[in-house]
Image: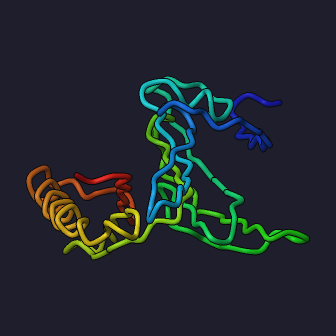
Amino acid sequence: MRRGSNYTLFLEYNIALNEGLDGVYLSSYTIDAQKRYLAATHFEPTSARAAFPCFDEPHLKARFELSIVRERSYFALFNMPLRASSPVQGSSLMRDEFDVSVEMSTYLVCFVVCDFAKVSNKTNNNVTVSVYAPANIIHQADYALHASITLLEYYHEFFTVPYPLPKLGECIATLP
């Protein structure tokens, strides 16, 4: 290795889903007496290290390139837009590949695998905002969508700093 040179390290890493609400965790919800599952992340403040090898310190930043293998009846979400989706040869699984992220701290990395429904719209600055929720309560997500768009536009105007990502997504597992 030479000082001042850039290197790329590729790692394949397997983890078990956590049963708590920390790291990469498994959660569930019920529709019509049928239990459904989702996998999600919560890395703040220092739980990214439970999901992938990293320097899990907020002042350290990196770009993240993610691919997720999932069942066909589910879809995957990440901080960045989906770049490609393709079948995994010899199985009923799909591989989703996402755009490379902006530089960010590990605790900001977020991904979800679920079968939620979604509502979406765009801000005045063409940022796609989506709210995801179980199909039986998606009609309750309109307020969250409207509030998210309004706040994102307000912050852009107030701070004169544009939102740095092409999309914003929120997942709502339960609503009162």
Q: Is residue 149 left or right of residue 167?
A: left
Q: Position of residue 4 (x, y in %)?
A: 68, 33
- Residue lying furthest front: 33
Seen at 38% across and 59% down, the residue is: 165
Seen at 57% across and 33% down, the residue is: 19
Seen at 47% across and 60% down, the residue is: 33
Is 42 situated above or below 69?
above
Is 54 situated above or below 170?
above
Q: Nearer the viewer, residue 132 or 27?
A: 27
- Residue lying furthest right: 90
Q: Position of residue 31 (x, y in %)?
A: 44, 63
Q: Quadrant of the N terminus?
A: top right
Q: Position of residue 71 (x, y in %)?
A: 69, 65
Q: Is residue 77 left or right of residue 159?
A: right
Q: Is residue 121 left or right of residue 155?
A: right
Is 90 situated above or below 3?
below
